[in-house]
Image: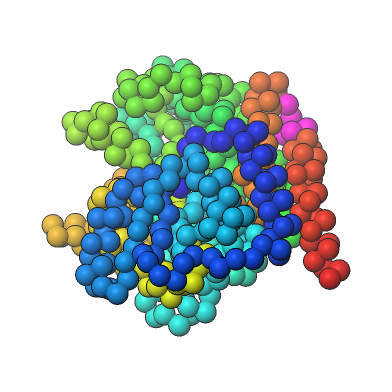
Amino acid sequence: MRDASPRPAALARRRLLQAGALALAAPALQGCGSASSGPLRFWAMGREADVVGTLLDDFHRAHPQIRVRVDALPWSAAHEKLLTAFAGDATPDIAQLGNSWLPEFGALGALAPLNAWVAATPALQPADWFDGIWQTNVVDGQLLGLPWYVDTRLLFYRRDLLARAGVAAAPATWAGWTAALDALQASGIAHPLLLPINEFEPLLALALQQGDPLLRDGGRYGNFRSAGFQRALAFYLQFFRSGHAAAVGNSQIANLWQEFGRGSFAAFISGPWNIGELDRRLGPGRRADWTTAPLPAPDNSAQRPGASTAGGASLVVFRRSQRQDQARTLIAWLAQPAVQQRFHALTGNLPPRRSTWQRADAAGQRLIDEPRTRAFATQLEQVRPAPAVPEWERIAQEMQLLAQRAVAQGLAPLAMATALDARVDRILEKRRWMLARKAAA
């Protein structure tokens, strides 16, 4: 799942309230679940829904006894449609879920655990998956999904502009990052880093590079006053206070790719979809001008590279499905490296298995050999999941809103972190109550 456009806070709040109400009602909901006859029902979103039908032709030839019907959902409506289906006992057999949704649907008891199945399936052992991505599917010790494709954030930068400024290579540390931006400013680029203030992912990535967890006491309270988060926040705010980044949002950038090509800025943080976009927008003649690099690590850190976010989408089986064996058969087929390789060729989505990155295509090319995608493979070895609580999307939005205020008002890191902890503790109040009831039962 691509989280490039954060949802409005009001929408996130409404969704979490709805999910909370459903969680309380879940024990009383009974029904027959997905029908045991007819085609296997598969709900998928976006471009993936269009492409997976092409892949299923081969699946049907390999498994003629299983027929699959793909229902395409827009990302903008998928979350509420899934919640409504759960409440109405109309969930599909299998679905694509954004990784950040798994804790919520896990809390509802909507998903069938996959631990025993994976343990009994040699071809699906977790060691072949990028660990940070695999962990996004583990909620309270239960494996609730299998990663389908992955997403993380790293640096896109103008190699030619860095060279002109006297910087020979992409920075590997925070100090080197600051020095590179100083050199770019001195070369005449007023704000060399594009860092939209309405995106929470860059700050989250910096926070994940610290040793301190973002939530404490089993996800019951915020931990944003920790030394680690304050250190990440101070570094983030310094980008704006030094002028390395302008305090603008996405809507104020007329055309990211065009401005990047013009040299209005020399670097930005984004995901793998922008490899294809930059190729299309700037053309093959400009490929030597730009490339990608993993995020720099904190100074004197053992991390190489710095950690980043663990995103993407996973495939899940709904607990009420009466055809769970067939649903798992489809998931296992889609997880094959050869199928993942074809899926990548059709969508540009990055595969979650290391063996797929090492597999040569018909032309003898491996995904790991292309420099701009290789940086993503390097980054994926150092990604960390966000806290696995249903309220996380709302918490991330509050983090972004308060960071935006800190940039505008010049707030100190401690002041912002204190305010964020207070908001997060209110958001988690229902979670504390439910966990207390569970412990007392």
Q: Give the quarter of the image for residue 26.
A: bottom right
Residue at 18% over, 31% down: 285
Provide residue 302's location: percent of width, then percent of height.
55, 56
Left or right of residue 398: residue 77: left
Provide residue 81's location: percent of width, then percent of height.
53, 47
Provide residue 235's location: percent of width, then percent of height.
61, 36
**Residue closest to the far right:** 440
Left or right of residue 110: residue 356: left
Q: The C terminus appears in which quarter of the rendering? A: bottom right
Q: Main secondary structure of the magenta part?
A: helix
From the viewer's side, name the closer residue of 21 and 293: 21
From the viewer's side, name the closer residue of 324 and 159: 324
52 magenta-colored: no
The total of numbered circles placed on residues is 0
Residue at 74% over, 60% down: 218
Provide residue 130's location: percent of width, then percent of height.
44, 62
Residue at 77% over, 39% down: 423
Residue 398 visible in this rendered orientation of the protein: yes
- Tell me if residue 24 comes above or below residue 7 in the rendering: below
From the viewer's side, name the closer residue of 145 and 307: 145
- Tell me if residue 63 comes above or below residue 217 in the rendering: below
Q: Which residues are magenta?
A: 411-417
Q: Give the quarter of the image for residue 147.
A: bottom left
Residue at 80% over, 66% down: 438
**Residue closest to the far left:** 363
Left or right of residue 441: residue 44: left
- Tell me if residue 353 comes above or below residue 16 in the rendering: below
- Tell me if residue 177 comes above or below residue 368 in the rendering: above
Residue 300 visible in this rendered orientation of the protein: no
Q: How is the image coloured?
A: rainbow
